[in-house]
Amino acid sequence: MLLKLLHIINNLGTGGAQKLLSEILPIMKNQHGIHLELLLLSDRKMHVSDNLVKNNIKITTLPGKNYGIRKILYIHRF
């Protein structure tokens, strides 16, 4: 059985949640039966994304610059 997990966060700038994701997602990816992706609400990427890229974590950034109903609909379809 495959478990699909989608993590959504504003950006990968500096911060505690961003650091937590950069450390825990590679560990979770190595578990059998887990498929995970990271969805960013804005395209601000910092050094914490290096660990995710190195571990082949799929990172998708929502299109557009402003928050609004379009982003909510995009997340719903995603």
Image (cartoon, helix red, strand yellow):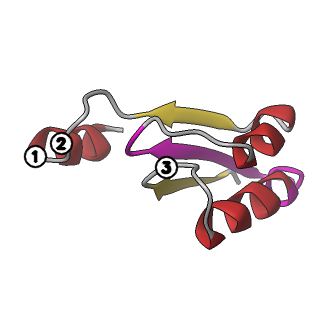
Q: Is residue 5 above or below residue 46?
A: below
Q: Give residue 35's position: percent from left, percent from top.
A: 69, 46
Quadrant of the image occupied by residue 49: top right
Q: Is residue 34 above or below residue 55?
A: below
The boundaries of the magenta stretch are 27-42
Quarter where residue 14 is shown = bottom right
For label 2, the residue is 73
**Please, which residue is most extreme toward the bottom here?**
16
Q: Gap between marks 1 and 3, in whole Å? A: 18 Å
Marks 3 and 1: in contact by CB < 8 Å? no
Is residue 43 shown in magenta? no
Q: Nearer the viewer, mark 2 or mark 3?
A: 3
Q: Mark 3 = which residue? A: 11
Question: Which residue lies at the image location 19% right of the left edge and 40% below the top edge?
Answer: 66
Q: Are marks 2 and 1 in contact (CB under 8 Å)?
A: yes
Q: Which residue is mark 1?
A: 69
Q: Position of residue 74 (x, y in %)?
A: 25, 37
Categorize mark 2 by other alpha carbons within 10 Å: few (<14), some (14-19), many (20+). Answer: few
| Residue located at (31% from left, 27% from top) | 63
Looking at the picture, how far across and down is residue 68, in whole percent? 13, 47
Looking at the image, tell me whether mark 2 or mark 3 is earlier in sequence order: 3
Quarter of the image that includes the N terminus = bottom right
Alpha-carbon span between mark 2 and mark 3: 18 Å
Residue name at image x 22 percent, y 42 percent: 71
Q: Which three-letter amino acid code belongs to the residue tagged 2?
A: Leu
| 47 is higher (above) or lower (below) than 22 | above
Q: 44 and 34: which one is in front? A: 44
Is residue 46 rendered to the left or right of residue 44? right
Residue at the limit of the structure toward the left, as seen here: 69
Taking 62 as reference, is 22 left or right?
A: right
Q: Secondary structure at mark 2?
A: helix
